[in-house]
Amino acid sequence: MPQRQLPFPSEMPNRPSVFESVATFALIAALLYLGAGILVPLVLAILLAFALAPLVTWFNRRLHLPDPVAVILAVALALTALGGFAFISGTQVAKLAAELPGYQETIIAKMSGLQEQFGNNSLIDQINGAIERLTTEMEGAGETRPGAPIPVTISNEIGPLGILSSVLGSIIGPVATVAIVAVFLIFLLMGRGDLQERFIRLVSAGRYSKTNMAIADASQRVGRYLLIQLAVNTVYGTIFGIGLWLIGVPSAVLWGLLIILFRYIPFVGALIIAMVPFLLAFAVDPGWNMLLMSVGLFLVLDLTTANVIEPRLYGSSTGVSAIAILLSAMFWATMWGPVGLILATPMTVCLVVIGRHLPQFQFLETLLGSEPVLSPPERLYQRMLRGNTEDAIEMTEDHIEAHDTQHYLDEVMMPALRLASSELADGPEALPQRRQLVQSFEALVDEVAKVDWPEQSALLLIGGRTEIDECAATLLGIRLANEGIASRVLPPVAIRQEAIGRLDLDGVEAVVLVFMGDDIRAQTRYAARRIRRMAPDTRVIVCALHESSAQESAETLHVDTIFRTMDDAVEGALVNLHQLEISELHASGKVEPFAGAGRGDDALGQAIEQIADAFGIPFATINLLHDDRHAEDEAAFRLTTIVAETRKPLIVQSQTPHPLVGDNAYLQTNGIDLYAAVPLILDDGSCIGALALLDYEPREFGPEDIAQLQAAADDLVQRFGQGGAVAA
C-alpha cells in the first residue's frame, strides 16, 4: 500500500493554544450566565421540540391534519398536561400547609423519646429547643401574657390594588416564562424544515451528509431520551404516590407528581424530593412503621428502576458517561440554577453528538461520551505495555467469551503487536518496554492457547529482528498448530551473526522469518545466505507483515517464498504439507484416491477441464466426502451426500426443483441453473464422492448425457481413483 502523504505545513490545521482555549471557554461561560434570561426559554423550547416533533409528524401522517393545526394541537396538549400538573400540585400544597400544625405534638413526643433513649445529646437538645420555641410562638401568637408588654403593631392597610399587584408579581414571572417557551416552541415546530436547512447551511461547510447525520442522531437520541425518561418517571411517580397513599403519608399525590419532575435531575433528584415524605412520615406516625415502610418503598423502587429498568430501556440512547452527566449537572446548575439541573443531560447528549460527527469538536465525544475511546487492540497494547497482565487477561477472557480464540488472536492480539512494532524502536532505548510487553504477551498466550511446542520439527519459525517479531512468530505457530502443523519458535538472536552458526537445522525442511517492521532486506539476505550454506535443501520463507514490505519480492530478498499476511502463511504451509504428503505417497508407490481433487493444473485437473469442454459446460468438479474444505459448505456437501447415498445420478434444474434437494442454498446463492452429478465408485464398491457439472444457464440434460457423464466418472476412477497405484 502506498504510504499516506503528510500535509504540507500550510495545510496543517492551526490548533489553538492553551490560553486561547481557556479564554474561549470563559467567554462562552460568561455569555451563558449573563444570557440565561433569553437562553433558558430557548433551550427549553428546543428540547420540547425534539420531544413533540414525532407527535406532530403522527398528526400529519395518520390524522392528515395540516401542519399548523398539528403543531397547535401538540403544544396545547403539552400545556394542558403542564397546567394539570401545576393545579394538582398547588391544591396538594395548600392542603398540606393547613395540616402541618397538627403534627407538632407527635414530633415533640418522638424527639423526647429519642432523648430518653440516647441520653444527653446536644443535637437532640437543640432540635427539641427549636421545636418548643416554634410551638410557643404559634400558640401565643394571639394571646398576651400577664405582665408582658403589650406589643404595638404598626401596619399599613393594603387595598385591593396592592393585593392584586402582589399576586401578579408572584405569578407573572413563571407565566411569562411558560408563554415565551410556548411561542418559541410553536415557531420551532412550524418552521422546523426551514430552520434545519438554515442550520445545515450555516455549519456544514459543504459536508451536508455529515451534518444531516449529526442532526438526525441528535434528534433521535434527545427525543428518545426525553420520551423514555418521561414514561419511566411517570410510572415511577405513580407507583411511589400509590405506595405512599397506602402507607398513609399525607399528600401522597403531591410527592408522586413532584418526583416525576425531580427525577430529571441526575442521580439525586428523586432522593431530594423523597426526603419530604420521609419527614412527614416521621411527624405523622407516633411509631416508626410509616417511616420505615416509606424508606423501604423508595429504596426498592429506585434501585430497581436505576439498575434494571433504565439500562434496558436506554441502552446506548444517550451515549454519555456517568461522570460526564455529573460534571454537566454541576456546570449547568451554576450557570442556570435549578433549570440547569433538568437540562444538563439532554444538552450534554447534544454536545456528544456534535463531537461524534464534526471532527473539529471530536474532543467533546472523547471527554463526555460513554463509548470506549480506545479500540480493543489499543486497550490491550496499553495494558501489555504497562505490565497490567491481570487486567489484560480479564479483557481477553471477555473477548473470547463474546467471539472465540481465533478471532481474539487475529483481530485483537495481532493489531496490538502492529502498534508495538510501529511505536517501539528496534534500538536498545526501547528494550525495557519491549521486554515488559513480551512478558505480558507470554502470560496471555499461556491463558488462551494451550500449545505443546515440540523439541524438533520440520518447520522452524524465527522472529526477524526484535522480540515483537518473535511474538508474531508465536501467533503464527499457534495458527499452524490449530491446523495440525507442528512448528518451533526461536527468538531473533538465533539468526544473528554471533549465534546463527549454532542453529540446529537437522530435519528442518523450511525456515520462516517473521517480520513486523519495515527494514527487512539486510537481515533477510544475511540469514538466507547463511542458512543455505548450512543446509542447502532447507527452504527459506519470509512472512513480511508490514505494509511497506510490499515492494520486496522473493528475488530481492533472496528467499524461496514471501508471504504478506498470516492467512497466506498458514495457507502456504497447508499446501506445502499436502504436497509433501503426496510426494511421500508417490515415493512409497501409493497415492490417495483423487489426490488434490483436481485443484490445479495437474493431470487430474486437466482431465476434469476436458470433461467440462466435452459437455460445453463452464465448470466441472470432483467433490469428495472426505474433503474437509468441501464439507465446510453444508449446502454443497448435502448434494454430494445425496449422490453417494443413492449411488444414482442427481440432476437438479432451477425450473423443476428436485424433491430430494428442495431449496438448496448452494445452488440459489451461486445462481446455478443446472447441477448434474454422478457417483464416483471405486473397485472395492465404496462411493467416495461425485463428479458434478455446473451451468449458470438452463439447459436440457437427458439420459444420453447422464450415461456419458457416468462413463467419464468411471474413466476418472480407473485413472486417478485407485489408491494402490500411482496415478498416471
Image (cartoon, rainbow, N blue to C red):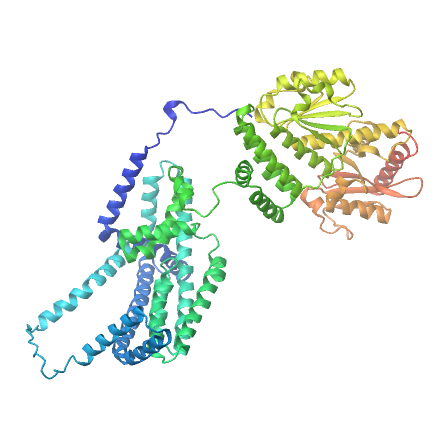
Q: Is residue 281 above or below residue 600?
A: below
Q: Quadrant of residue 528?
A: top right
Residue 193 percent location from the top left of the image: 34, 49
Q: Position of residue 389 (x, y in %)?
A: 58, 41
Q: Is residue 202 left or right of residue 157?
A: right
- Residue 437 left/right relative to 15: right
Residue depicted at x 62% and y 40%: 444
The C terminus lies in which quarter of the figure?
top right
Point out the image quarter for the N terminus: top right
| Residue at 89% from the left image edge and 26% from the top image edge | 587
Residue 241 picture location, percent across and down:
39, 72
Q: Is residue 190 visible?
A: no
Quadrant in the picture for residue 562? top right
- Classify residue 454 by image quadrant: top right
Front-lying residue, 145 or 587? 145
Rendered location of residue 481, percent (x, y): 73, 37
Q: Is residue 62 in sight in this rendering?
A: yes
Q: Nearer the viewer, residue 522 or 580?
A: 522
Q: Is residue 23 above or below residue 125?
A: above
